[in-house]
Amino acid sequence: GEGSWIGAGTTIIPGVKVGKWSVIGAGSVVTKDIPDNVLAVGNRCKIIKNLL
């Protein structure tokens, strides 16, 4: 998404969308859509913080 940051070594499964201004931690595996303005990390990426 617009303004999003994707950490090094992150895998995003085809078809998955990352929301605007979200941050995905390094080495994460993103298997489902990530909403706008969140911090998400982990293998099977989980949202850990709302950034607003």
Image (cartoon, rainbow, N blue to C red):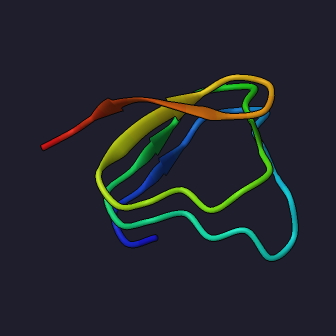
Direction bottom: furthest residue: 15
| Viewer-nearest residue: 40 or 11 | 40
Residue 10: quarter of image: top right
Q: Residue at x 62, y 70 (%)?
A: 17
| Viewer-nearest residue: 47 or 3 | 47
Q: Residue at x 75, y 26 (%)?
A: 27
Q: Residue at x 46, y 70 (%)?
A: 1
Residue 21: quarter of image: bottom left
Locate residue 16, reporting x and y percent.
73, 68
Q: Is residue 31 left or right of residue 18?
A: right
Q: Residue at x 35, y 61 (%)?
A: 36
Locate residue 12, reporting x and y percent.
79, 54
| Viewer-nearest residue: 29 or 3 | 29
Locate residue 25, reporting x and y percent.
57, 28
Q: Measured along the vertical axis of the image, is residue 47 above or below residue 18?
A: above
Residue 6: quarter of image: top right
Quadrant containing the C terminus in the rendered view: top left
Q: Measured along the vertical axis of the image, is residue 36 above or below residue 29?
A: below
Count of marks placed on residues: 0
